[in-house]
Image: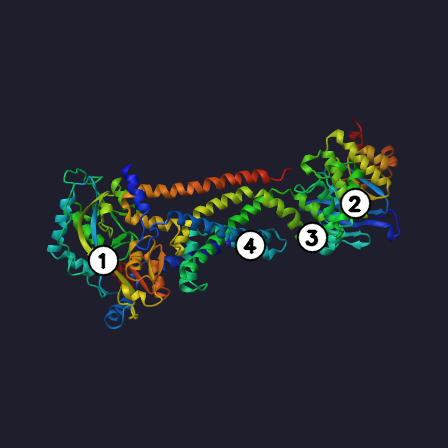
Amino acid sequence: MSTEIQDASDTVVELIDVQKHFGELHVLKDINLSVARGEVVVVIGPSGSGKSTLCRTINRLEPIDSGQILVGGQALPAEGKQLAMLRAEVGMVFQSFNLFAHKTILDNVTLGPIKVRKTPTEQARAEAFELLDRVGIRNQADKLPAQLSGGQQQRAAIARALAMHPKLMLFDEPTSALDPEMINEVLDVMTDLAQSGMTMLVVTHEMGFARRVANRLIFMSDGEILERATPNEFFTNPQTDRAKDFLAKILQH
Amino acid sequence: MNKKIALAVSALAAFALVGTSACSSDDKDPATSTAATTATTDAAPALKVVGAPFTTELYGVGLPLDSSLCEQVNTAIADMVADGTWLAKLNGQMEGVLYTPNPETNPPKDFEVCDNKAGTFTTASSDTIKIGIKFDQPHLGFKEGSTYTGFDVDVATYVAGKLGFTPDKIEWVEAPSKSRETLLENHQVDIIFATYSITDARKEKVEFAGPYFVAGQDLLVRGDDDRITGPESLNESDYKLCSVTGSTPAQKIKDTYAADVELVEVTGYGECITALIAGRVDAVTTDDIILAGLAAAGVR
Amino acid sequence: METLTQYWEFVTQKKPDGTLLYDVLGAFWVNIQLTLWAGAVAMVLGTIILAMRISPIVSLRAVATFFTNIFRDIPLTVVMLIMWLVIWTQLGVSFGGKMSTDFYILAIIGLGLYHASFIAEALRSGVNTVPLGQAEAARAIGLTFMQSARMIVLPQAFRGAIAPIGNTIIALIKNTTVASVMGVATETSAVMSGMIETGANFVLLIFLTFAIGYVLIVIPVGMFFTWASRILAVKR
């Protein structure tokens, strides 16, 4: 059930009674969630809790069995041109970066604006350079993704998503595939982005980031949302046993 | 589902193959074969051999160079002609077709001189004799299931008998044109009766006994086509001439008689016959007896 | 040594009008041309079939799968015989002009149809080298299925399919000899048959001539594709 009633124009994403099965497995149970404009929502929980699936249903990379998903007040259409247009408004950053391996970093970032938004090439390139500058890899623009480190690739992926001027950014475990020394460079970019007012939904294991940057924390386990709270509330006073269990384990190291 | 459809189409294709190239005489039911016999005497045949043969091809008996059988083979052929078997078998195979072999050279009288009298090889195995024949020339050398028929087979059986091998001791092996010399050299066959023309080039690799038949190149046309009477007439119009890939007859016609004829070369005579009957080519050329065999296959 | 001189005279003998009786080099050139044309047909058709196979529309996928299975299950010789017995003989298909041109075109069509199915499978294996995430990222930035296929998946799929495509082309080079079934009389196996018919004493040398000829063609092609597949491989 929704815990807050919000003004429609301010709600960027709303999930209502969403259910999803993978065969026999009930991976999303009664998901109700809404994200307001400028909010940073962080989703945490043990593996297999459905966090990634939740993230991927929002831009329909995973379809749902029942329930409703509204993005910017509009229901998610089926596969087709409409859905493509809607996806252009939602940026996604993947755990495995998924940069287009056969194109340079610059081409990766300009492809969306040129082909989808029909931005003129020169303008797209200028904006791309700005974005690459912002994420700190301007000098890698002409390289191929395989030539960059993991942290650089993920920052490029963020720039690629931002190039579409999205209303919402989805992050599906963005640092889980990175070596420890590169995690911070990516988290810094994400923190920066949050502070600039971007609406974000982040699935992550990085508790420090969650504590510092999140407006709201969602705890999921076995496909259900078990707790919703501010970071402080959650870390100091978890309500459910499952959450207590989880925190005890992760805070040990 | 897709596999079944694919199999069905393959079966259809195989069916088309078999139906067009094989002599299906033995499968016809009594009613139609009676009709066919009366038809050959009253109605025009589907295909006919036209004109006199315009080359000479001596069908020899192929033997390895180290064979000692040459003289015996010549004697056997002479016996076969003398006691009437040769003519009887030939007529039997060519029944129903208007064909007479060249009377000046048939039955053969002048045999090859056997060069290698010092040869010692007879057969690879003492129990059986391996005879190389064609499997795809109706009424000459033809394989139907597990039976082998044709004039080559008839002569081969007679000669083998005279060499001391009864029919049950004969093993028939396919001798395609390209492999005849190699099969003999390697003793993979002991003797060959496979419309094997005697040429000087071949005599360097194999020994020839016989000949047991003198053929000549000729033309096969549709039964109702009276325009073509001989090789020169092929030059008169837009004629299309069919033969087998790599064989010499077609090129010979083009070079010697009819420079304007269009040549079609295919894998086997079956394909030529199908094209002839369908009207896509106007004549088929090869040795006259092979043509007669193909025509006879269509009649019966 | 004397046999070799005799063989050389045999191979280079001329017809009454002055042209070569056995145009061996010309025959190889015919097979190379057949390879180029049939290869082009196979590549274009194979790409179309691949696109149909990976499309989200079920009926297109079914047609493509059906086509591939048919042509992979029927031997090439049978395909050519069907072209000859059914298409040319019974249906009388013609493209105007000389019969030899008809045969040439029908042979190219037969070879092209047959190898298209193998090209489609090679491309499909190339598609499998492209991680699913590439297509997901493409969709996530708002590209349509066609755009994602055209700009992201297929370019990488092609580059990943160079090696199996090369294998198909090498098979095609050798398979062009089956064009003789479709009446193409100037290609290598037909010329070889003619040479053996009259040059029975040179059988081994004739076989060697054509075998070596094909080796000389196939080896550089194989080396080229190995090199190309390495150079063009998408580094991940």
Residue A20: % across, % down: 72, 48
The answer to which image quadrant residue B299 occupies is: bottom left
Q: Are marks 4 and 1 on the same chain?
A: no
Residue C193 image offset from top left, x and y in percent: 33, 49
Which residue, given by chain and number where applicable, does mark 1 sit on? B55
Within 10 Å of disc 4 (Cα), the crowding (few <14, some 14-19, many 20+) is many
N-term-proximal mark, 4 vs 3: 4
In x, y percent, where is residue B75?
A: 12, 48
In three-dimensional space, the C-alpha distance between marks 4 and 1, rounded to whole angstroms, equals 54 Å
Categorize mark 3 by other alpha carbons within 10 Å: few (<14), some (14-19), many (20+). many
Which mark lies nearer to you, 3 or 1?
1
Residue C197 drawn at (x, y percent): 29, 49
Q: Which residue is mark 4?
A: C64
The local secondary structure at tag 4 comes to helix
- Please give the residue where the numbered disc 2 appears in the rendered image: A127
Give the side of residue A15 with respect to residue B204, left or right. right
**Measured along the vertical axis of the image, is residue A173 above or below residue C180?**
above
Amino acid type, mark 1: Thr
Q: Residues within 10 Å of mark 2 (few under 14, many from 20)?
A: some
> What residue appears at the point 23 percent right and 60 percent down from the top-left corner?
B54
Residue pointed to by mark 3: C144
The amino acid on which the numbered mark 4 sits, given as a three-letter code, is: Ala
- Whether residues under marks 4 and 1 lie with C-beta atoms below 8 angstroms apart, the answer is no
Label 3 marks a residue whose chain is: C
**Image quadrant containing the C terminus of chain B:** bottom left
Q: Say left or right for B57 vs C87.
A: left
Is the same chain shared between marks 4 and 3? yes
